[in-house]
Image (cartoon, grey):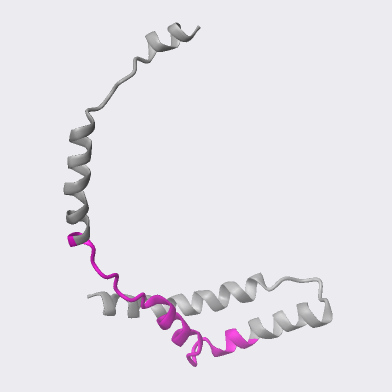
């Protein structure tokens, strides 16, 4: 059985010297190409938009719904309120993303 498998999948051996040289040469190149990642502006922009006067009423409704569910044990979820709040935040934030990227 083993010979059948080795006939189908022959063993391939690499030359050890070439592999070692390629690894040594590739390491310095990877260090040179490494760049510092830019700061992510998305959380900051979304936080500011969530606190804006346009989204404040929706945030209030979401917080009230969350309070009702947690404290009073209301048989509802706050999905609709969450969607409305996130829609407002996205409408506010998207133009700001593009102005920062350009």
Q: Is residue 17 above or below residue 59?
A: above
Percent from the top left, x then y, of residue 81? 63, 76
Residue at x-position 29% and y-position 70%: 37
Observer-nearest residue: 83 or 34?
34
Which residue is depicted at the point 59% across and 85% down? 59
Quadrant for residue 94, please give it: bottom left
Verify whether residue 27 appears in magenta.
no
Q: Picture coordinates of residue 87 (x, y %)?
A: 50, 74
- Placement of 36 over or under 24, stated as above or below: below
Q: Tell me the quarter of the picture where residue 39 sits.
A: bottom left
Q: x and y percent of residue 16 in the render? A: 23, 32
Residue 37 belongs to magenta span: yes
Q: Which residues are magenta?
A: 32-60
Residue 84 left/right relative to 29? right
Residue occupying the far bottom of the picture: 53
The residue shown at (22%, 55%) is 30
Instruction: Give the percent coordinates (x, y) of residue 63.
Output: 66, 84
In the image, is residue 44 above or below residue 9? below
Question: Could you say which is closer to the camera, residue 51 or residue 8?
Answer: 8
Q: Is residue 7 above or below residue 78?
A: above
Of the 4 image quadrants, the one containing the C terminus is bottom left
Q: Nearer the viewer, residue 12 or 34?
A: 12
């Amino acid at each position: 059985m083993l010979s059948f498998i080795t006939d189908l999948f022959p063993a391939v051996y690499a030359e050890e010297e070439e592999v070692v040289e390629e690894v040594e040469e590739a390491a310095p190149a990877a260090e040179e190409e490494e760049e510092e990642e830019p700061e992510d502006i998305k959380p900051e922009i979304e936080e500011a938009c969530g606190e804006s006067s346009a989204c404040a009423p929706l945030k209030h409704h979401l917080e009230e719904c969350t309070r009702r569910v947690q404290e009073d044990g209301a048989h509802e979820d706050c999905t609709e309120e969450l969607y409305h709040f996130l829609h407002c935040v996205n409408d506010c934030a998207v133009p700001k993303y593009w102005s920062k990227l350009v």
